Amino acid sequence: MKYRTTNGAFCLEEIDEDFTPEPSAWFTTFVLKSLCSAGTLLNVDEYILEEGYEWLLNQVSGSNSRGFEIEEEDPRFIDEEEQQLLAEVLISSFGCSYPMSQRTSIKRNSLKQWWSRMSRSRLRRMTPLTLAKVAYARQSLNYFDSTWETAVRELKRKRTRSSAGYYFWSNEYHDAHEPIMYETRPHSETIEATAYSLLVFVKVNSRLACRSRRRRGRAYRQCRNMYINPHEIADWLIQWRNGKGLFVGATDTAVATEALASYRESKVIHETNLDVNVTASPSENFTHRMMFDEEDAFLPQSLQDVPLGQNLHVFTAGEGIGQMHVDASYNVPVDVNADCQFTMNVTRFDLDYERLREGNTGVCSVCGPRLTCPKGDRFTCSIESDVAGINAPPTYCLNVCLKYNGNFNHGKTFIRVRMLSGYVPNECDLQEIEGERVVSATFNDDYVLIQLRRVSAEEEECVGFRIMKISDVFRIKPATVTLRSFNVDEWTCPRTYESGDNVVSTPFYCPLQVNDQMRGCSCINDKCVDCGRRNTPGRTQLRALAGASTYAFKLRALAMEEHNGYRHLMFNVEEDLKPCVGDMAQQHVTFVTRQECGCPVFTEGELYWVLGKDFNRYTDEHGNNSFKFFLNANSYLLSSALSSNFPRHSVDITRAYRSTAGRTCN
C-alpha cells in the first residue's frame, strides 16, 4: 500500500510525504490482478479494487485517457503499446471475481464492446507479444469468433522453434541449430509472449478434438492451422525457470507461473504417483531412484554430484507432472592460441661454458648462434661465472624465436617476458640486442618488454638474453611470455618457461582416483614433521600447543599403505583430548605424510601422541563423511619409542588439555 495513490492507482516508486511519483497504468493493472488472485486466500478490501479499476478504466476510456476515447477512435488504429494495455486491462478487470459498482461495470462493458470491433487484417501486423495478449484477452471475454481464430493462426505462424524442438515467441532472430549451451538467457518480453501463447494453446487444445484420424472437414482444417501441443511450449518455459521458480522479472514470472498452472490443470491428473530413475553411464555405474506420491508431491528432491560419464538417462513411470532441473558443471574448450598469428618457441637452457672459457662473454656467444647482436664486437657484456672461480649466481639463457604465419613480413610487434620469481635479466644483454630489427628492450616491474621492428614470414628469428637468480624462492611457478601487434591491445600466444628445479608449484593431495582421474584434491602443507623436536616437552610448550591445535590424539599404530607419493598411516584413537572434529575416541583414523619423509618410523602397535590442526573432510556420493589428518610441520608428534618417559609426558599432555585454552576449539 506504500505505492498506492489517493485515487486508487499504483506507482513504480514508493510514495512519501515529499514526493508522489506518476502512477503507472501497466503496474496498476498487474497489482489489481494480483490482489484479485490473492483474494481467494486473503482478506482484500473491495474498495481498493473498486477505486483502482475505476481509475484504470478512466485511463483508457475517459477524459484522462492516454490519447483515445472509446467513442472517438477506431480500435483498428491504436498502436501496439496501447493494444497491449487494453488487453491487459480487460484480462484483469473481467478476470476479477469481486463485484464492481454499476458505474464501473458499465464503463468496463463499454470498453469491451468497443474493443471487440477489431479488424482481422490488423492482427497480421502485430508483434508476437501483442498478438498473444490480444488472443488471450479475447478468449478471456469468451470471444471465440473468427477474429480469435485468425489471431491463433497468426500466433502459430509467428512461433520460433528452438534447437531442442520446443516452441517460443520472440521478436529477435534465433538460430534453430545453435547448441543450447551457447544460447543466451531470453528477455522478459520473450518469456511473457511465450507464457501468454501457452495460455492460448491450452484453450485451443481443450476446444479442438485434434486426435481424430479424419483428414478433411472444418475440424481438420482448424487443427492443422491452429493446433500446437502445449507440451512443446511448457517445456521451453520450464528450462528457463531457475531453482527458486523465477524467470527474469516480476511480470513475466507471474504470467509464466499462471500459464504453467493452467497447463498443469489441463492434464487432469487424478493422483500423483511418479517413479523417476536417474542413471549415469557408461563410465560410471550409478543409479538413483526418486518417488513422488500425494503426500510429498510438493517437496523438492535433489541429487548432488552425479557422475555424468558420457550419458545421463532419466526414466519416468506412473502418473503425475513435475519439473526437473539438471545443473551441470562443464568447460567449453577454447584454444588459448585461437587468435595467435605467430609461431613462437621459448626455451631456457644452460650457457655455452666452452665459449665462456675462451673469453667470449657476450650473449650472442654463450646463448647460441641464432641470436643477432647488431653491435657485434664493439659491445660485449661480461658476466661472473663459476668457471672463473667466483661463486656467481646461477645464470641461464632465455631465447624467444618468432615467425609470422602470414604471406608477408609483419610490422611492429611487442614481446612481453615475465621474470621467474627470484630472477632478473642481465640488463647489459638487453642493450646489446638493440638495433636493426630490435627497436628497444627494457626491464621494468618484473617484465622485459622487447619491441621488434618487423617479424619475418620466411624464417624463424630469435632474440634472447641471460637471466640470473638473485634469491631463493620455494616452489617457483612457471613464467609467461606473450606478444601483441602494434595496433592490438590484447596479448596473445601465451608460452611458459620454468626454472628447471623439477618441483610442483603448489603441493596438493587427492584422496580418490577414478578412471585415471584424481578426485577431491586440495592444497596442503606437506613439509615433513620434525620427530626430534621436543621429545621432552616442557609444560609451557604443551600449554601453547594445546591452545593452537585442533585435535589431540593418543594413537596406536595399525597399518601403513603407499598412495600416489604419500603414506597413509592408520591408527586407532586411544584418547581424544580435544574433540573439535568430533569425538574420535576408539575410532580408526588415517594420517597422511609424504613418502620421502623419514619420520615417523612406523612400527605396528607403537603408541604416539599427535597434536595438530591440519585435516580435510571428504564426502562420498552417499553423503558419508570421512577425515584425513595431515602429519606435517604444523604437527607435534611424540613417539613412545623415542620419548625418554612416555607415561609421564602423557600425563603432562592430558593436564595441558584440561585447561580452558586446551578445551577451546579454534
Image (tube, rainbow, N blue to C red):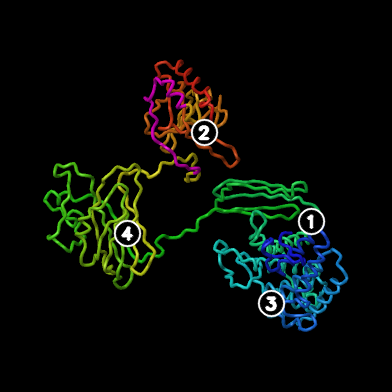
Residue type beneath disc 4: Arg
- Between the residue at mark 4 and the residue at mark 1, the CA separation in whole angstroms equals 67 Å
Image quarter where the N terminus lies is bottom right
Is 30 left, or right, of 666 in this rendering? right
Location of residue 46 with respect to 305 vertically, above or below? below
Residue type beneath disc 1: Ile
- Between the residue at mark 2 and the residue at mark 3, the CA separation in whole angstroms equals 65 Å
User: Who is closer to the viewer here, 203 or 568?
Assistant: 203
Is-magenta flag for residue 528? Answer: yes
Residue under label 3, please give it: 80
Of the image marks 2 and 3, the number of the one nearer the N terminus: 3
Of the image marks 1 and 2, the number of the one nearer the N terminus: 1
Residue under label 1, please give it: 269
Location of residue 112 with respect to 653 vertically, above or below? below
Of the image marks 3 and 4, the number of the one nearer the N terminus: 3
Residue under label 4, please give it: 416
Is 518 left, or right, of 167 in this rendering? left
Question: What range of the chain is rendered magenta?
Answer: 519-545
Of the image marks 2 and 4, the number of the one nearer the N terminus: 4
For marks 1 and 3, give the one nearer the viewer: 3
* Main secondary-structure element of the magenta-colored stretch: loop
Q: Residue at x 71, y 62 (%)?
A: 3
**Within-10-Å neighbours for mark 1: few <14, some 14–19, many 20+:** few
Tell me, yes or no, if residue 610 can be seen here: yes
- Between the residue at mark 1 and the residue at mark 2, the CA separation in whole angstroms equals 55 Å
**Within-10-Å neighbours for mark 2: few <14, some 14–19, many 20+:** few
Location of residue 257 with respect to 219 vertically, above or below? above
Q: Residue at x 23, y 45 (%)?
A: 394
Asked where in the image residue 387 lies, by quadrant, the reply is: top left
- Between the residue at mark 2 and the residue at mark 4, the CA separation in whole angstroms equals 46 Å
Residue under label 2, please give it: 666
